[in-house]
Amino acid sequence: MLPNPIDQDLFLLEHPSDLISLGKWQKTVNLLSKLFHAPAGFLVQHTSAGFQVTISSEQSSNPYPAGIVIESDANIFCRRIVETGQALYVPNAMIDPCWDTNPEVHQDGFRSYLGVPVFWPNKQPFGTFCVMDYKETEYSDTYIELIEQLKDILESDLSLMSLYQQMQTLAITDSLTDINNRRGFTALAHQRILLAKRMNMRQALLYFDIDDFKVINDKYGHGVGDKVLIAVAQSIYKAIRRSDVVGRLGGDEFVALVVVQSPDDIRQLQKRIFTGFEEAQRQQKLPAFTVSIGDIEVDLNLSFEELLDRADHVMMEKKAKAP
């Protein structure tokens, strides 16, 4: 999907769902530590930044609070699980040379580790569910079965969260072009405008309309017209930054909210977009088409609908003046 793809990286911390209670997860981790008589228990998420402690058992003996991140290349127990996709039980790390460089062992004093992998519904690794102890342990098979059962509960919640996010994405995504629909664009644009106000950033709003689009549909058919719409959406999306927002308002009208520093930024952006239109026509053998663009600098004193109306008006003026 083009805009704002579902990013599982830090998904849990950035997109908590009302469908689950993180308090329930906290209780599960606390219970795990209690049942195992362990001084520390964790739900750890593997992210691009490293291994992040998402939930940490609430004990004074636990040295790792929620939120800390351990680098991805560190020789820690959770890394082994994520790499192998298998459960890991280390009764005494001090007698196994492979853990000689493990900071959890030689800096923090842990000796024992028991952890199981936690997966997203698509079978990609979320991270680990684990307990750690400062002394050597002798966990029976019943304990290992118990931690597996508890992690199944966590994976069920991840399935609910993933489904909920997919449903939200479908509700704000244009099914043809795979960019934000009017609802999605409006919601994201409001957020970006508020952020720009706090950060004292300048923004521009661009309003796009395909010229004589009805003629394209009538002459070549709606299938070709759909390809033109997709090409326009892709060209705009590829030309903007990931932090900018693009959407299809409906029909052949598109909008983009972008951060700029000067009027020249808007000109350069439009140049990139027009180049994208030309490349799409050539590479996809589309019929020739042109697009009228109206642009305004965002006035933070105006409502969002007023901004859209102004950009639309500027676009219509340019379209009327076009030869």
Image (tube, rainbow, N blue to C red):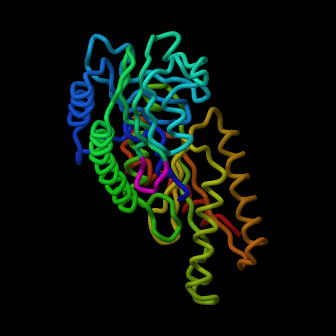
Task: Give the residue at x 35% y 61%.
Answer: 171
The C terminus lies in quadrant: bottom right
State left or right for residue 255 relative to residue 132.
right
Closer-to-camera residue (81/91): 91
Relative to 110, say whether 292 is above or below: below
Task: Give the residue at x 65% y 59%.
Answer: 235
User: Residue 210 appears in which quarter of the rendering?
Assistant: bottom right
* Number of numbered discs overlaid on the protein picture: 0
Could you tell me residue 286's position as x and y percent?
Answer: 71, 77
* Main secondary structure of the magenta stretch: loop
Relative to 320, say whether 70 is above or below: above
Closer-to-camera residue (68/168): 68
Closer-to-camera residue (38/177): 38
Could you tell me residue 176's position as x and y percent?
Answer: 50, 71
Could you tell me residue 67's position as x and y percent?
Answer: 40, 23
Relative to 38, say whether 252 is above or below: below
Q: Is residue 37 magenta?
A: no
Task: Give the residue at x 57% y 38%.
Answer: 259
Closer-to-camera residue (7/126): 126
Could you tell me residue 43's position as x and y percent?
Answer: 36, 32
Q: Is residue 121 magenta?
A: yes
State the extent of the magenta-drawn residues as a range.
Answer: 119-124
Relative to 263, say whether 238 is above or below: below
Task: Give the residue at x 54% y 46%.
Answer: 296
State left or right for residue 122 relative to residue 66.
right
